[in-house]
Amino acid sequence: MAISLAFIIIAGLLADALFRHARLPGLVGMLLVGVLVGPYVFDFLSPDMMAVSGDFRRIALIVILLRAGFELRRDTLHQVGGSAVAMSSVPALFEIAAITLLAPPLLGLSWLEAAILGSILGAVSPAVVVPLMIDFMERGKGADKGIPTLILAASSIDDVFVIVIFTVLLGMYGGGEINWLWQISTIPISILLGILSGLVIGYILYLLFKRYDFRPPRRTIIVMGSAIVLTWLEDTLHGIVPMSGLLGVMAIGFIILEKQEAIAHIISSKLKKLWVFAELLLFVLVGAQVNINVAWKAGAAGTLLIAGGLAARSVGTYLSLLGSGLNHREKIFSVVSYVPKATVQAAIGSVPLAVGIPGGEIILAVAVLSILITAPLGAIGIKLMGERVLMESDRPPYSFKELRGTLGLPRVGERILNREMGTAWKVIEERETWHTPSGPDARSVPAILLRIWLLMDNQDPGKGLTRMIRFTPFDERFDRKWEIIVN
C-alpha cells in the first residue's frame, strides 16, 4: 500500500501542477489521474489501498469541511440564510422530477427506478464545490454578498436532503411499509442534530483551548480527532437517530470561530497545510472509483438524461435565488456552481445494483457517467466564472493572515522579550479587528491586538501586569523591538 500512496502523491501533484499551469482547477487533473491509475484502467493501486479508500476519502472530506466551518461567519449566514435553505432542496427536487420523467423513455427504467436514479444524481458534490468556494473566500471574492458562503452552506445541506429521499425510495422498492411522516421528519432532525452536536463539541473544544495552552499543531489534531469521532457517531446511530455528521463537522469550526477568532484562524491555517495531502487522497481516490467501462454503457441516452436533469436543476437554482439580491451574472455563477457531482454518486451509485434492483446496472452506469461529465466541467466553470463574476470585497477577511506574516507576530502562548527593557512577557490573547486612522479620507485597515502578560515567579495568567499592543500595516516589524523566546 505504501507504494500506491507514493504513486498517488507524485502523480497527483504532477497533474495538479500541469492543470494549474493551464489555469484550470488542479482537482480536475487529480480526478483524471485517479481514473487512469484505478482498477478499471491501468490498475496501479494495490487492493489494500482500494480497501481503505472509503476511510481515506472520509478523512479528507472532514478536513475540507472543517476548513469550511472555520470560514463561516454568523453575519454572513444571516445574510444568505433564506436563499441557502431554498438552494438546499429546490434544485434537487427539480432535477429528481426531470430524471423521473425522462429516464423511462430514454433508458427503459420503471418510474420508481427512474426516481431512485434521480435521487442519486440530485446531489451536488461538496468535495468539488467546497474547496473552490474556500479559495474565493480567502481572496475576498464575492464576500460582500456572501456568495461563496451561500453555495458552501446550501451544498452541504443538499446532500442530506437528497440522501434521505434516496433512502425513502429504496425502501419503497423493497415493498416494506413506509412511515412517510417519520421519513420526511428525518431531514430537519438530521440537520438540526448534526449542527447541535457539532456546536456542543466545538464549544467544549473552545473551553479546552481556553483553559490549557496547547501548541497550534496539537489543537488541530484534537479538532480533527473530534470531527472523526462525530462522523463515527453518525454511522453508529444510523437507523436509530438521524444525524448529519458532516454538518456537525462544519459546526465545530463555526463555534470556535465565533468564540475565539484568533485560535480559529490558527487552526484553519494548519488545516490548509494538511489539505495539500488530503486533497490528493480525496480526488485521486474518487477518480479511482470511476469505472469507464460501466459509464460507456450509459451511452448517448445517459448523456442526454444527465443534460436534461442539469437543465431542470439550473432552473430550480435560479428560482431559489429570486429575491436574494444577486444580479443575473451572480445567479448564473451559482447555477454553474451547482453542477459538479462526484462524492455522493461514487458512494451510493452501486447500491441499487447491490440490492437487486433490475435497472441497477443502468443506474450505476449513469451515476458514473455523471461524475465523468459534471465534475471536471463544473470545476472548470466555477473557476473561470468566479474569477470574472465575483467582486473583491473592500475588506478581504484574510488580510489578517497577511498582516500577521508581514509583521512576524507571535502566537497565543508564545513568550516574548522586550529588547529595550529586558522584560519577558507571554501572549495570552489575540484579537482581530479593524482600525480607522484619523483623517477625512482615512480607510479602515486590518489590525491585530495582542494582550501580553508580564512573566513573574509564582503568578497565574490573568493576574498581575498585562498590556494590549495593536499592530496595523503601518507599523514596523515585531522583531524591531521584541524577540520571540524559543522554549
Image (cartoon, rainbow, N blue to C red):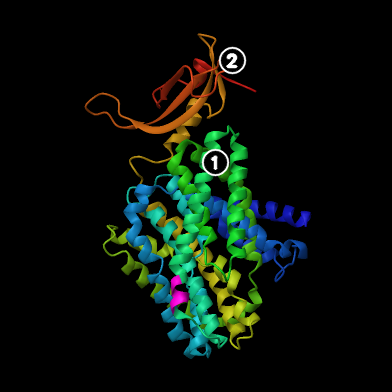
**What is the x, y in percent for residue 215?**
60, 34
Residue 183 magenta-highlighted: yes
Judging depth in this view, the residue of 116 and 189 nearest the camera is: 189
* Residue drawn at 51 percent across, 55 percent down: 197
**What is the x, y in percent for residue 14?**
65, 52
Residue 451 magenta-highlighted: no
In the rendered structure, are the residues bearing label 1 and label 2 in contact, judged by CB atoms less than 8 Å apart?
no
Determine the secondary structure under disc 1. Answer: helix
* Residue with the mark numbered 1: 267
Tell me the amino acid under the disc marked 1.
Ile
Real-space Cα separation, disc 1 to disc 2, in angstroms: 31 Å
Q: Main secondary structure of the magenta part?
A: helix
* Residue drawn at 59 percent across, 73 percent down: 348
**Residue 319 to residue 199: above or below:** below
> Viewer-nearest of labels 1 and 2?
2
Tell me the amino acid under the disc marked 2.
Asp
In this rendering, the count of numbered labels is 2
Work out which residue is located at the far top of the displayed protein and give it. Answer: 421
Determine the secondary structure under disc 2. Answer: loop
* Residue with the mark numbered 2: 457
Q: Is residue 285 visible?
A: yes
- Left or right: residue 232 compared with residue 376: right
Identify the magenta region.
181-185
**What is the x, y in percent for residue 299?**
56, 82
